Image: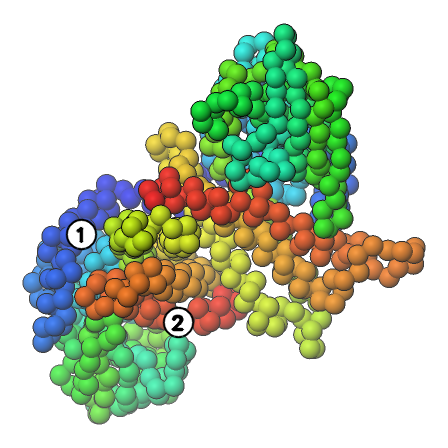
Amino acid sequence: MDLNYSQEELAFRDEVRGWLKANLPADLRDKIANYEELTREDLLRWHKILAKQGWVAPSWPKEWGGTGWSVVQRYLFEEECGYAGTPPLIPFGLSMCGPVLLRFGSEEQKKRFLPRIYSGEDFWCQGYSEPGSGSDLASLKTKAVRNGEHYVVNGQKIWTTLGHYADWIFCLVRTDSGAAKRQEGISFLLIDMKTPGISVRPLILMDGGHEVNEVFFDEVKVPVANLLHKEGEGWTVAKYLLGHERMNTGRIGGSKRELAKLKEFAAQQKKDGGTLMDDPRFRDRLSRLEVELMALEITNLRFLDRMRRTGQPPGADVSMLKIKGTEIQQGLTELMMQAVGPLAQPFKALSEDAGFDEFTAAIAPRYCNYRKTTIYAGSNEIQRNIIAKMTLGL
Amino acid sequence: MNFDYNEEQQLLADSVRRFIQKDYEFEARRKIVASPEGSSESVWGTFAQMGLTGIPFSPDYGGFGGGAIDLLSVMEAFGEGLVVEPFLATVGLGGQLVARAGSDAQKKAILPAVVEGKLKLAFAHTEKGARYDLAHVNTTAKKSGSGWTLDGEKLVVLGAPAAAKLVVSAKTPAGLSLYLVEAKAVKLKPYRTLDEMRAADVVLTNAPGELLGAQGKALPVIEAVVDFATALICAEAVGAMKFSCDTTLEYLKTRKQFGVPIGTFQALQHRIVDMYVAYEQAKSMAFLACSQADSSTDANERMRAISAAKIKIADNARLVSQEAIQLHGGMGMSEELKVSHSFRRLTMIAQQFGDADHHLERFARSG
């Protein structure tokens, strides 16, 4: 029993930490630290820096540019990125489309798409949710009808994250409405966003930010060559993806960084002749979050250790990392907002001499934005269903 | 990084589990609790034979030279079985104080007997008004010839009714000190605790004592040993939580209402999932507590880690124990079900050696 990383793992962590320090551009680091919205160019710039270093797709096989790192090294890398405050690597290409291409794609599809995902030439987004299909994904209605060498797609996707930046979208579509089970008759299509008939409409969230969209398909012609896996077996692909790469959903590194920032920030807030950190009511809420995060980090390491020892993919119980990780993230944004007190209210300046700084003004919107975390990627209630069914046998 | 027990630890964990399943099942335990002594000599003898009483003591005194990490699986098994024998009082508290503060002669006189299962100890420390303040001691020790005499009153001395010797804290002009006192030299007011162990209030009147360790230097030793014992009850809590979760899951699968097992109801499924998540988080912190109790050379770092663990254990012990009763419905209230007994133990562990509020304060101070 040993809770510490090995010497080799520590050396690896230090190497990553040092490299990030030297290579994360200061303007990007500041944007993240100040809670500013990132542009497509910001995201791609960081993607390309990592691609050049050979670290952009660690979990891919080496022949396609993977690093050959162990599960622990992969975890350390992602957590170090979170802790350093790098821009996120957008997962839709690298850790969603890439892995399913590797598992189900034809050689031709792999050669066509993987190098462009790796290099950042193609920006991908995900077409899963529909207005009537959220947690109940298998009820999706977007239709694809085979017509010669094309599928003709009609329907609508929603909550399409960064769809307005994307070159490509991978979609679950219904190719057979008469199938006996709803999960049958679904196919996985790769669709060029420039195809005529696709339109993207922004969905502005309550924080005022534009990150998600509605995507409409009106008689969109998709070449049959863009079908991934077999027609009618898209659900198999979707399920594979659900079980993939779920070791970092706790986002420990990012939360550690936010916690440190919150402590520093709270210690600067004056209150009753002292600072907010002297207020036991505030401090205890902060401590409880910190303790929950300490526990989650060890729980996460226990999962990694189990994976390493058994060589098995993570079980359904890793859902708890998502549940706890997102609860902690939300808790941190809530305390950060509370730390600003009445100054949480100013939102958008109406004149140039408005007397508030951008950082303070970004704190409450960020609290609003983070309400998404317990809803997206399988709501926390769905995660509980998964544990109840798969782990507890209920 | 490795969360596996080594071979020795695994063998030990397995044999303790087997013993508890076979010879310490709920009915056997009930008889022990109802007996006049409230603990079983034969069970104690088995623990000694298995080597459990020797784990955290030096081989110089017949022990195995282990630490809290080596006791982790034992304490988890004790938590699952709700073992009432005074293991914590003897091995975790009294024995540790002797091992850390005692002279070689004192250790030779006491520790081999503890390891062999022939001697039980207790730590008489808490006083009226002290709550969890380890420095709050009004009992006094005065020089008397070549020895000392002690006067004062101690509360809730765990394991005192079974102990032949007590380690007693007392004030001298030089500060807080520790003494070995024969149990027969004090007046005991014994009772059963809510979690079905035996304890006593202890009255010392001109009681002869033998100085243990340096006069006036006891506080850091007491803090370290109470942290060690805290790590042990964190592990014990994990076992009691595991039992609570498992037995509740079993109940959800078998209890039928409205024609179906109640575990088919989502309102209950999500609650038991939260119980299991709380158990896993608690387990992670018990690992941390036991590892820091052993390896930390910095008292501040140790206190911070142990307090963090105890905050989590206290919060999650409440959650798991309360939900286990709620999900059992009326049956959970009955003394006939073991789950109402794990409830009582978890309730007491949550505030033994400091409740969450106490440890939140210490955690913040050591940050």
Residue B132 is drawn in which quadrant? bottom left
**Mark 1, secondary structure of its residue:** helix
Q: Amino acid at mark 1?
A: Val
Outermost right residue: A352
Q: Quadrant of the C terminus of chain B?
A: bottom right
Residue B213 is drawn in which quadrant? bottom left
Where is residue B348 drawn, in percent x and y? 32, 70
**Mark 2, secondary structure of its residue:** loop
Q: Give the chain of mark 1.
A: B
* Left or right placement of residue A186 versus residue B40 in this view: right
Where is residue A181 drawn, in percent x and y? 45, 27
- Mark 2 or mark 1, earlier in chain: 1
Position of residue B140 relative to residue A206, above or below, is: below
Q: Give the chain of mark 2.
A: B
Using the rendered image of the protein, determine whether residue A26 is visible from the camera's viewpoint. no
- The residue singled out by tag 1 in the image is B16
Where is residue A163 drawn, in percent x and y? 71, 32
Position of residue B125 relative to residue A28, above or below, is: below
Q: Amino acid at mark 2?
A: Gly
Using the rendered image of the protein, determine whether residue A199 is visible from the camera's viewpoint. yes
- The residue singled out by tag 2 in the image is B354
* Left or right placement of residue B359 versus residue B73 in this view: right
**Label 2, label 1: how far apart the Cα atoms are:** 28 Å
Outermost left residue: B42
Q: Quadrant of the N terminus of chain B?
A: top left
In front of the other: A184 or A208:
A184
Coloration of the structure image: rainbow
Which residue lies at the image location 33% right of the left edge and 42% below the top edge? Answer: A393
* Left or right placement of residue A61 versus residue B327 in this view: right
Labels 2 and 1 within one chain: yes
In front of the other: A253 or A150:
A150
Outermost top residue: A148
